[in-house]
Amino acid sequence: MEIPYTVSARPDTGLYNAKVGIWLFLASEVMLFGGLFSSYVFLRIGADFPWPFHELKVLPGFINTMVLIASSVTVVAAWASLKARRYGWYQINMLITIACSFAFMCIKGYEYYGKFTHYSVILEDGTVFDGHPAHASEEHQGDKIAFTEVKEITLAPGKSNLHFLRHRRVSEGAKPFGKVPEGQLVKVRLPSNGTEIELTEEWYKGLQKQYWDVRHARRDLNTLLARIEAPKTRADDLRKTGEGETPVPVDFRKVEAFLNEYEKLKVDSAEKVKELTAKVKALEGAAPDVVGDTLKLQVVGNPLVFLVGEKDLQTYNATGVTFRDDTVLTGKMTGDSIPFNIDAIDLRQVKKPENSLAWKYFPQLKEAYVKHREEKTAAYVQKHPSHAGNYTEVSDWQHEVLRIPLEEIMPEEQAHEYLHDEAHSVHIDRADKRFYSNFSPSRSPYYAIYFLMTGLHGLHVIGGAIVLGYFLVTGRKMYLNNPEHLANRVEVGGLFWHFVDLVWIFLFPVFYLM
Amino acid sequence: MEPSSDKSHGHDSHDDHPIDLAKTVRTYLKVGATLILFTGITWGVALIDFGSHAANYTIGLSIATFKVSLVGLIFMHLNHEKPLIYKFLLFTVIFAAAMMFLTVLAFLDPIKARFGA
């Protein structure tokens, strides 16, 4: 069946069908992005935290804007080339368009990478340190909590898995938290008979099977007993309604009937009860380690060492750690601080910046901060005399003065050392930490909507590039057969591409400049 | 490469006349250059304080709107489009404006206004 009006215009609309279709689609897209921009405004106006304006690097965004504008020119030139029946020019322009989309995504990827490797710690008093965790390699503690001398492992076979073993490390001289050599297993002693076994998935699966066999047998027995007891309970309840301060007349025939039913059930089920009780006992006897809900295993040989990320834990204290799956390790917590190198201090959410926790970790920087504050404030008041009395309430002053990139208060080389040199890293007490994250969507609503909108836009770029690439690769046959049809297809693809450019034209100032 | 046949000939109702490629592309290049120039201007004016955030945002978004208009009018051919497309766009604008208005409504809280926060 031939699709109508792919080339010629439909008489009533005056347009070929695909053009009507793309404009309807673009209308829905305008509303989609319109809704998101509206959400952005809502989040920004309603933010109960200092909105991180002027924190994205402008240059990558600027280059990406130019790249998209260039691609908009080439895609419309590709269409014009087809209209002029110049297929070679069409190919060149389309190729540049697709190259531009690739460049755009590469620059976007570079920006995203920067966000995911840049961290910030929000302290309990609101002080924010931006930077990155110090020595985050596997051999070092990083931002993880260290547990050593672990001699006892408590598993809850109904809930636990052996994932805690992923956090195991080995201590070897200079590397206190080295990687576990391939195939080196943990040996433990079973509580029931003192047998030594190796903690393997296979052994644990067998143990869990025994655990559930016992539970299922117990459940069957308990269900049967409850069923036998049920009429007796009802009889007792009925009898009780005739007692107390406001007695109700009791139907003793019913009570009698329930008691008779109970006696009958007891006799009829006696054999079954006996059988199930024997089954439970047999299973428990065969697997004494799973009689209780937890299983305490003693580590054989050297005590174990673990490095655990906070998000994998339920709780921890000086002598032990409980994982989210109820596995408990008993040992010694030897370190839970967060080693961190900084590139900026943000005091905008601190009530009294001069008493900030920042100075607990960087007392040497307080003097420079005070000087910086005085100088910046003087310059600000001179520039904005109308704010002389209330400058502390103005977000611009707060941004300029209370958010302190280190290179503003020290030479650039020294600031570089603070960010990269281990000697300048600080160990932040976990008790001082309120929030710790990279600059991913979880960091703040700003980054959530930044990633949502730029990510959705990026998906549009990828989708558009695929469609235009398809026209480029497969267009020759259609061009030879019906060039106007190909021109119309490219026009429709181009309209989508211009829309993608158009969205970016708004995204750039909104996210990067305002 | 020349197409062996051109089925569009005599069918296409609105863009059938041959196109002057060099002239058309020159126009597109000029528009592209203008867009890049105004991107630079957007960055430039963002460094200037116009007295209030509202003024800064208005100027920044006005330039963006101007750029978007150029893309729409020239690249997307909205300067000579069929009436149906403009009707679609009219509805789009109404719905998009309504969505923005919902955000405004969220901050025009009558209870808060009468009784305080």
Image (cartoon, coloured by chain):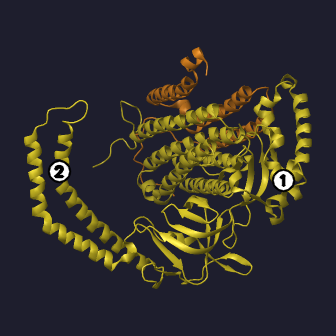
Chain colours: A yellow, B orange
In the rendered image, residue A283, in percent from the top left (x then y), is placed at 29, 75
Q: Is residue A419 above or below residue A85?
A: below
Camera-side residue of A12 and B39: B39
In-front residue for pair A250/A194: A250
The kind of residue tagged 1 is Phe
- What residue do we see at 56% from left, 30% from top? B79
Chain hosting mark 1:
A
Image quarter for residue B11? Answer: top left
Are the numbered discs 1 and 2 placed on the same chain, yes or no? yes
What x and y, as percent, mark residue A490? 49, 48
Q: Secondary structure at mark 2?
A: helix
Report crowding for label 1: few under 14, some 14 to 19, many 20 or more residues within 10 A (C-alpha). few
Is A38 situated left or right of A124 in this image?
A: left
Residue A228, located in which quarter of the rendered image? Answer: bottom left
| Element at label 1 | loop
Q: Can see residue A75? A: yes
Q: Position of residue A176 (x, y in %)?
A: 70, 76
The residue that mark 1 highlights is A362
Is A426 left, or right, of A300 in this rendering?
Answer: right
Residue A431: x %, y % from top left = 69, 53
Number of callouts in the render? 2
- Read off the residue under disc 2: A232
Query: In the image, is residue B46 above or below residue A204?
Result: above
Q: Chain for mark 2?
A: A
Name the residue type under label 2: Lys
